[in-house]
Amino acid sequence: MNDAVLDHAGQSAQPAQPTPIPLRELLPWVIFGGLLLLLALYFIGAEQGATSLIPGMYVHEFVHDGRHLLGFPCH
């Protein structure tokens, strides 16, 4: 049995092969994502505490349920 893939015209077509992404192109995105995760962790875990950067309770109320979901005490 022939295992060739045929296109709509009946001609043999090769399946697409994924190309690897070089580490030097991926590394800036990994660093950027890591910094975003650290910023999110700060706002969820530490904002409105001893190191509060934003006055008021707006950030606390916005991330309140996320704090409990992740196990951060807040009250």
Image: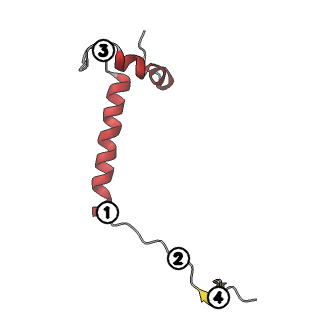
Residues at marks 3 and 2, CA–CA distance in whole angstroms: 52 Å
Give the mark toward the camera: 3 or 2.
2
Which one is closest to the eye, mark 1 or mark 4? 4
Identify residue for label 4.
9
Of the image marks 1 and 4, the number of the one nearer the N terminus: 4
CA gap between label 4 and label 3 equals 66 Å
Q: Nearer the viewer, mark 2 or mark 4?
A: 4
Question: Counting residues from the N terminus, which is met first, the one under dot 2 or under dot 4?
Answer: 4
Q: Which mark is residue 49?
A: 3
Q: What is the three-letter code of the residue carrying label 2?
A: Ala
Q: Which is more N-terminal, label 2 or label 3?
A: 2
For the image, the number of numbered tags is 4
Q: Amino acid at mark 1?
A: Leu
Q: Identify the residue at horizontal 34%, vertical 13% (top origin).
A: 57
Residue of label 2: 16
- Residue at (47, 22) in percent of width and height: 71
**Residue 54, quarter of picture:** top left
Q: Are marks 2 and 1 in contact (CB under 8 Å)?
A: no
Of the numbered discs in the image, which one, if any, rests on residue 23? 1
Q: Amino acid at mark 4?
A: Ala
For the C terminus, the image quarter is top left
Tag nearer the camera, 4 or 3:
4
